Amino acid sequence: MKNIAFTLMLFALIFTACNTGGSHTKTAKGLEYTIHTKNDGPKAKIGDYLTLNMQYATENDSVIFSSYRNNRPLSFKFQETLFKGALNDGITQMAAGDSATLLVPADSIYGDRLPNFVKKGGKIKYTLSLLKVQSEQEYQAEVEAKKKSQDDADSKLINEYIAKNNLKMETAPSGLRYSIAKPGTGAMPEGNNLVVKMKYSLTLLDGKEVESSKGASVEMPMNRQVKGLRDGIALIKKGGKGKLIVPSTQAYGERQRGSVPANSVLVYDIEVDDIVEGNPVQPASSVPAKLQTTTSPAGNTSTAKLPTTMPAKQAPAKGGAKEGK
């Protein structure tokens, strides 16, 4: 069903392109682009914040990546070093509401190290729909407004959860709720490579368990955890035990993360056995995948992560236009 919807979406985009005509242009850098729908608004420029849908594929239309498929637009700050090749030139020809197809020389992306599915002199085909162009001030204002709205919604849900379960929780300045059943000792070590050895369980407000160490103590690198968990561990400290209720804006935000729905409040029950500086000694697989996070350009996890636009050096799936990883 998803494949049918994806095909219909691309067909609609192609149909629009055919009916709006578009002007085909080739630049001195070898970029070929066609603007299918053209608006009179200001064009994107370096330093703007862009929201767009993007697909890139081989010349025979085998799709390597597409944000259209799951309708997950990308939001990011447009910087000179963000994209390799001549793609920047094409984006700067677009205004909000424009859609375009760009053929970018593959060697401007890969240099001499072409993957085996791209021929020498070949091109990578990008399909773009530019949804929004904002100044930094406009973008940050929108981020703050969305965060406040979500924080208010989270706070209501958290208060209901606390009342229903007859909990006594304190509130940190960030909005994180916490209770300490057993106080820990010592200050949080400084450094970017902190590893916490702890027992934990993670549930949603409806009681559904997402992750658990099943009573075992596991090593977890702090730079791969959500902000709310990092802040909560600093409050509970080494040797401590407690409960954390993390607002969604300090967790995974508006992105679904595995079995964690978008805008989910997270409930942690943790026991901190040790906090050290250094790399975890256990394999990376011991770190719960659902507890790993990334930071968006706005400094929170609510904005979709921007994938690299350098296509991976692996052949797309055979059998036509299929989305790569």
Image: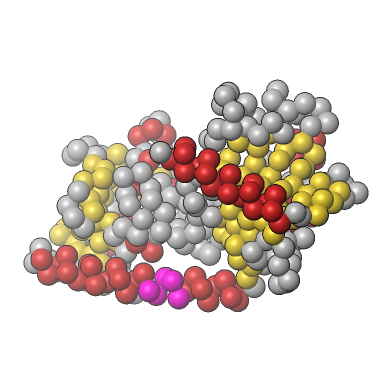
- Is most of the magenta stretch helix, strand or loop? helix
Residue 35, position as x, y percentages in the image? 74, 55
Residue 58, position as x, y percentages in the image? 68, 33
Q: Is residue 112 magenta?
A: no
| Residue 312 can be seen, yes or no | no
Residue 238, position as x, y percentages in the image? 28, 53
Question: What residue span does the magenta drawing correspond to?
Answer: 145-149
Quadrant occupied by the N terminus: top left
Using residue 235 as the reference point, say whether residue 14 is left or right of it.
Answer: right
Residue located at (75% from left, 54% from top): 21
Q: Is residue 148 magenta?
A: yes
Residue located at (18% from left, 55% from top): 206
Q: Residue furthest front?
A: 19
Using residue 207 as the reference point, say whether residue 319 is left or right of it.
Answer: right
Taking depth in this image into account, of 274 and 217 the one nearest to the observer is 217
Taking depth in this image into account, of 294 and 83 the one nearest to the observer is 83
Residue located at (43% from left, 50% from top): 293
Residue located at (60% from left, 57% from top): 52
Using residue 180 as the reference point, say whether residue 26 is left or right of it.
Answer: right
| Residue 141 can be seen, yes or no | yes
Taking depth in this image into account, of 96 and 303 the one nearest to the observer is 96
Q: Residue furthest right?
A: 28
In the image, is residue 315 above or below residue 184? above
Using residue 75 as the reference point, say whether residue 41 is left or right of it.
Answer: right
Residue 270, position as x, y percentages in the image? 23, 51
In the image, is residue 155 above or below residue 184? below
